[in-house]
Amino acid sequence: MNFAIRPATKADSQDIWRMIRDLAIHEKMLDQMNTTYEDLERDAFGQNPWCETLVAEVPGEDKSKEGFKTVGFALYFYSYSTWKGRKVYLEDLYVMPEFRGFGIGKNLLRTVAKVAREKQCAHLELSVLGQNIHSRSFYAANGAEDITARDDWHYLRFGPQSLTNFISCQK
Amino acid sequence: MNFAIRPATKADSQDIWRMIRDLAIHEKMLDQMNTTYEDLERDAFGQNPWCETLVAEVPGEDKSKEGFKTVGFALYFYSYSTWKGRKVYLEDLYVMPEFRGFGIGKNLLRTVAKVAREKQCAHLELSVLGQNIHSRSFYAANGAEDITARDDWHYLRFGPQSLTNFISCQK
């Protein structure tokens, strides 16, 4: 299978949005997806973008049964550690099911790793659910270390309602 | 205790650097700190900064026994979720020991929460070590939810050597 990895442009928004939804449907968590297509287009491709995206494309003769040539994506952003310096965080990595097994995901991941190296980042980081054994094996096989298992870091979150409560409480 | 919270400028680099080191020493993890003063100054206050910082200042009459007026800081960056949209990640929150108990930390945290709200972020997120019971209580009391305990997310990392290995391996 021939494929090419390239930085996404605004013209790819529809394809990226379609695959983000496919991933949410696959994980039976579409109800957790609050972003709209307009959010993604504005945040990923507006002024001062909040993330960067790579897409994987196949030639026309290999297009999906629905007619899609853009068959995978990796979405990441830059983060920072006061102890380690510059970092990249990989938010999403996805390849359409019928295009798996050809190395597209690994190639997307390697391209993100190269971006991290070019930007002089110390770390490339990401999160996976404990139950996602397949992804955990994939990343481990490629050299990622499970920091949660090693150090017992806990990830904490203020959601929209907690933020509102905390901002308005002046105690 | 009177204090003021304001965005940091390059002139604050020495104070922020001193407190990042103090925090690492306090946690007995100074050997984990690889960033230099020059890294911080360039990454936090150069062109296209990798993070933003707030500092807490006290009046001259309340300065620390070593003569410092900048007694706390919060360092954060912007992150992104394909399901939730814009987010802020709080990397470090620190108040010098002799200035604790006056609400400086909570005020720094609230100022970061307000930045998150102004930027239309859905979430403010951060990580704490499981053993850091004091911090976990502080954040929980202010409304943060422990996502690691709730959802079993695992945080994975490619460190510098893993990145090099992965980039150079073309399998």
Image (spheres, coloured by chain):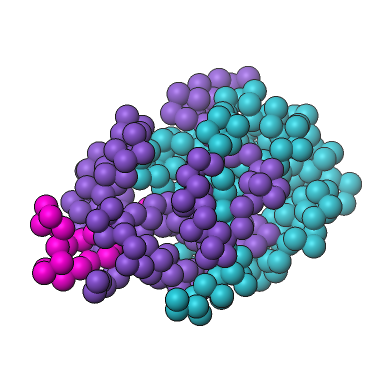
Chain colours: A purple, B cyan
Residue A18 placement (x, y as % from top left)? 22, 47
Whether residue B136 appears in this view of the structure is yes
Residue A51 part of the magenta segment: yes
Specify the quadrant of the image occupied by residue B15.
bottom right
**Residue positioned 83% across, 48% down in the render:** B26
**Residue positioned 62% across, 42% down in the render:** B127
Q: Is residue B66 left or right of residue B106?
A: right
Task: Give the position of the C terminus of chain B as an image quadrant.
Answer: bottom left
Q: Is residue A103 left or right of residue A131?
A: left
Residue closest to the eye, B45 or B6: B45
Residue lying at the far right of the rendered structure: B65
**Residue positioned 34% across, 63% down in the render:** A101
Quick check: A6 above or below A149? below
Residue B91 placement (x, y as % from top left)? 60, 48
Task: Give the position of the N terminus of chain B as an image quadrant.
Answer: top right
Q: Which residues are magenta?
A: A47-73
Residue closest to the eye, A114 or A130: A130
